[in-house]
């Protein structure tokens, strides 16, 4: 049997078998060419194909591309198909492994969080501000949204009145009175639960308030000075000096100082170092006294009188308020549309409202942050004090009864007597937790034999803090913002203690006694007066 070749000539079996074997060798050579580079050939040999086993292959030849093999691939292409794919797969496996680990870790942390309950992620508090003003806050931020927090879940140690405002992840605890100085406070929220459920946990933080520093005024024959000092008196530093300092007050960031010049008074505002001074514009050329400040309202107030006053012109003892920043004009307080002459006045703590008694005996309240004007609260003989954080004033009515007046609704209750009863008080200064009462002590015949400051707690329990003998006088008693300390200004030996020639004359020798109200112990006696805890300067 024979097979025809392409040319049409019959082939023998041997020829056909030889043709098949040649075809198989060519197929094997093509398969080998995919992995082993072919041997380069000379141009004149193009078209000839020799068995790869018959031609030795050198290392240099193996690196060169073939010119005559259409199936030969570019070496770079060969490396990409043969080597890059495994590397890509290894990189992909690595990424998948990392992602898997992160998923496991995140899941584990989520499980731990669910098992532990909420935790604190951030705490915000300003301890320095907290000892100076009411209304400071500590804000706890949890790591997840919380279910509603009830005030009963919150405790503060040492105990202090507070309110709670919670939403989302935040819990705000607002202290309604200033805090004690140099004290560790612990705030705890018991049983806080995430909004999505899960176990409850306690959120707790502790912060420390700084030691108190006060300002004190010291007058001399040369210059008057305002000093900054700690409660030991050993680190006093003068911050402002002027020949005649009539009055001053302190805010959390500023000093407001009234000085006397030949042409009248000037009111200066500066920082606590006595620097960055700017002067306030007064209503005219005149004199200023009874300076007070509203830290919360950003206001300064004072009693102003023109230098030239006649029966037909000039203002006498009008109450003026203006911004501490110096912006805007000073505003005179009016009653019934007329500028009123004021006998005594006070800023209501933690507000921009003024409480005052005019020379007609009318007690009025005027919120200087609005335009409602003065609100009449009846007749009064004396304004004794206004409590921090309660919006309550202690007032002596014209019938000599002493009442606690609620400034929000006008209701009033008689001021409870102390136990023991030390007698009627000439002045009463409220502080958080009680009052300081200035008492004139008398003998069995009713003659004065001395003076005392009595601490009376809210429950009526009374105790004498300081006693001075006849011949000396207590000018003023003030409490620190939290009621932790008292400052009592004493004029010793009045017979030999001459008065100065200031707008509001005072004895030239004055001393301030600092007393720990918790223990009743006296800390130190300092030379000077008008400690910055006081809402106004002393008068005698």
Image (cartoon, helix red, strand yellow):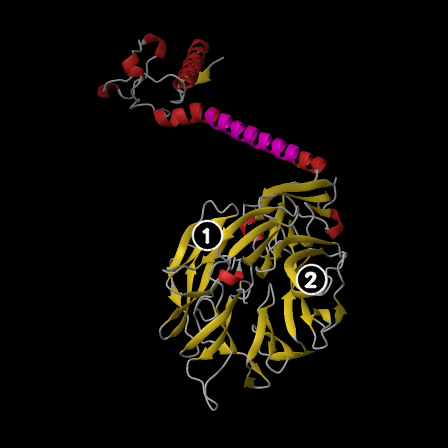
Q: CA distance from mark 2 to mark 1?
A: 37 Å
Dominant secondary structure, magenta: helix
In the picture, the disc for residue 123 is none
Q: Position of residue 315 (x, y in %)?
A: 48, 83
Q: Is residue 101 shown above or below 351?
A: above
Question: Callout 2: 10 Å neighbours few (<14), some, many (20+)?
Answer: some
The residue under label 2 is 442
The residue under label 1 is 228
Q: Position of residue 503 (x, y in %)?
A: 45, 71
Q: Are marks 2 and 1 in contact (CB under 8 Å)?
A: no
Question: Callout 1: 10 Å neighbours few (<14), some, many (20+)?
Answer: many
SS for callout 2: strand
Q: Position of residue 40 (x, y in %)?
A: 28, 18
Q: Of residues 497 and 266, which is closer to you in this image?
A: 497
Q: Position of residue 343 (x, y in %)?
A: 57, 76
Q: Which residues are magenta?
A: 87-109
- Residue drawn at point x = 47 percent, y = 64 percent: 498
Rendered-image quadrant of the C terminus: bottom right
Q: Is residue 225 shown above or below 8?
A: below
Asked if residue 429 lies in the magenta stretch, the reply is no
- Residue drawn at point x = 40 percent, y = 16 percent: 29
């Amino acid at each position: 049997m024979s097979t025809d070749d392409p040319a049409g000539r019959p082939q023998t079996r041997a020829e056909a078998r030889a043709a098949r074997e040649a075809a198989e060798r060519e197929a094997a050579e093509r398969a080998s060419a995919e992995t082993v580079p072919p041997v380069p050939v000379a141009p004149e040999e193009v078209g000839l194909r020799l068995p790869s086993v018959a031609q030795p292959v050198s290392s240099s030849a193996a690196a060169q591309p073939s010119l005559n093999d259409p199936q030969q691939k570019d070496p770079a292409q060969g490396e990409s198909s043969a080597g890059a794919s495994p590397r890509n797969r290894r990189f992909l496996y690595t990424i998948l492994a990392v992602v898997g680990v992160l998923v496991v870790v995140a899941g584990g942390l989520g499980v731990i969080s669910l098992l532990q309950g909420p935790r604190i992620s951030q705490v915000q508090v300003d301890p320095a501000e907290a000892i100076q003003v009411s209304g400071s806050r500590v804000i706890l931020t949890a790591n997840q949204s919380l279910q509603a927090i009830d005030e009963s879940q919150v405790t503060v140690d040492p105990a202090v009145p507070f309110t709670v405002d919670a939403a989302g992840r935040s819990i705000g605890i607002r202290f309604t009175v200033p805090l004690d100085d140099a004290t560790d406070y612990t705030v705890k929220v018991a049983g806080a639960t995430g909004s999505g459920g899960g176990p409850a946990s306690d959120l707790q933080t502790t912060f420390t308030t700084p030691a108190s520093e006060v300002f004190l005024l010291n007058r001399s024959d040369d210059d008057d000075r305002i000093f900054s000092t700690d409660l030991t008196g050993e680190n006093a530093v003068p911050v402002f000096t002027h020949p005649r300092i009539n009055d001053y007050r302190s805010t959390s960031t500023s000093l407001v100082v009234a000085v006397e010049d030949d042409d009248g008074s000037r009111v200066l505002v500066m920082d606590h170092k006595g620097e960055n001074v700017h002067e306030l514009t007064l209503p005219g050329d005149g004199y200023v006294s009874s300076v007070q400040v509203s830290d919360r309202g950003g206001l300064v107030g004072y009693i102003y009188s023109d230098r030239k006053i006649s029966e037909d012109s000039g203002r006498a003892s009008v109450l003026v308020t203006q911004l501490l920043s110096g912006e805007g004009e000073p505003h005179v307080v009016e009653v019934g549309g007329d500028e009123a002459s004021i006998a005594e006045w006070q800023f209501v703590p933690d507000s921009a409202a003024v409480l005052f008694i005019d020379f007609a005996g009318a007690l009025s309240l005027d919120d200087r942050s609005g335009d409602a004007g003065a609100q009449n609260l009846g007749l009064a003989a004396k304004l004794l004090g206004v409590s921090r954080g309660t919006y309550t004033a202690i007032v002596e009515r014209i019938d000599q009864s002493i009442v606690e007046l609620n400034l929000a609704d006008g209701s009033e209750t008689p001021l409870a007597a102390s136990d023991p009863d030390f007698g009627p008080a000439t002045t009463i200064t409220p502080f958080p937790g009680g009052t300081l009462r200035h008492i004139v002590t008398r003998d069995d015949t009713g003659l004065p034999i001395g003076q005392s400051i009595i601490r009376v707690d809210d429950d009526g329990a009374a105790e004498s803090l300081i006693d001075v003998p006849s011949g000396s006088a207590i000018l003023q008693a003030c409490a620190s913002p939290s009621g932790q300390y008292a400052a009592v200004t004493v004029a010793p030996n009045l017979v030999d203690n001459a008065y100065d020639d200031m707008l509001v004359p005072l004895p030239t020798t004055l001393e301030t006694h600092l007393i720990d109200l918790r223990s009743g112990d006296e800390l130190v006696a300092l030379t000077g007066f008008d400690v910055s805890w006081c809402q106004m300067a002393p008068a005698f």
